[in-house]
Every structure is written in structure tokens, then in C-alpha cells.
Image (cartoon, rainbow, N blue to C red):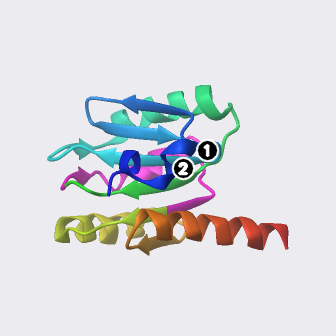
Amino acid sequence: MRLSDSKYVDQVIEIIDYDFGIFYFLEDIVVSEIHEGITFDWECAEKVIIDAKRILGEDCRPHYISNRINKYYTVSQDWLKFFNNLYFLKSFSVITPHPSGMMNLIFERMFYRRKIYQVSSLHEAFQRIRELQEEKIS
């Protein structure tokens, strides 16, 4: 399910449709829906980071949901560039119904230093974020 077709669309602050995918910016969450056949690399990520800082604030550390509704590829080692530039996420959730998405996830886990939550739906991803926020408060 696309975020635009979900009950969470009312929480969206801004939507940016890049040539590589659609990104939804919520108060403390960024949701991506990368276009079919794209190779998502550091050059793409930098564009999103610049816009996230503009929309969410210079020191933002959002929860990130990768809504993998299309088949695409990632450059997993680009996570090293992400960390070397001192960017951090509060959490990283992946919704992946495609086998190719599972392969991306396996490689991303090799380079992403924190836990990646594999979930089956947008609702489950938002629920996971809510649980993480409640744990932080406790």
C-alpha cells in the first residue's frame, strides 16, 4: 500500500516526488517509495537529506520507513558515507514484499550499524515507531 492511500497521509507535512522516488516527510518520520528499477545511491540520499534538514530541522534524526512497493536496487556500501557524514536515524523499518527487496535488506544489514526492523505493512511500521517512542518515554 502506498502511503498516499493510507490513513497516515493526514500526518504528511510535505511530499517530494524526485526522479528516483516519492518521499513523504512527517513530523519525525520520513517514508520512501523508490520508483521501479532505480538504483538508490548516495547521490539520491544526499538530495533527501538536504530536504529533510530543510523540512524537519538541521539536527533532525527521523525514523525512516522504506516502503518497498517497487523493485529497485540500493548501493549498500553507501551507508558508510551516510555515517561518515554523521547522519543518524532513530529507527529504520523496511516493508518488502519482493525477493529483490530481501536481497537489498541482507546487504544493507552488513553496512547499517543499527537494527533494521523488517515489517509487513505501513501500519506495522508506524506501530513499531510508536512502541519505540513509548520505550524512550519510560
SS for callout 1: loop
Q: What percent of the width, then of the height, locates residue 93?
A: 47, 64
Observer-nearest residue: 22 or 72? 22
42 relative to 71 in the view: left or right: right
- Residue 45 numbered mark, or none: none
Q: Is residue 51 above or below residue 10?
A: above
Amino acid marked by disc 2: Phe
Q: Is residue 28 above or below residue 136?
A: above
> Where does label 2 land, which residue?
83
Specify whether residue 23 is painted magenta.
no
At horizontal 41% and vertical 39% (from top left) the residue drawn is 23
At horizontal 23% and vertical 43% (from top left) the residue drawn is 35
At horizontal 45% and vertical 52% (from top left) the residue drawn is 80
Specify whether residue 73 is painted magenta.
yes
- The magenta segment is 71-92
128 relative to 132 in the view: left or right: left
Q: What percent of the width, then of the height, locates residue 107?
A: 31, 67
> Where does label 1 land, which residue?
86
At horizontal 70% and vertical 37% (from top left) the residue drawn is 59
For the N terminus, the image quarter is: bottom left
Q: Residue furthest right?
A: 138
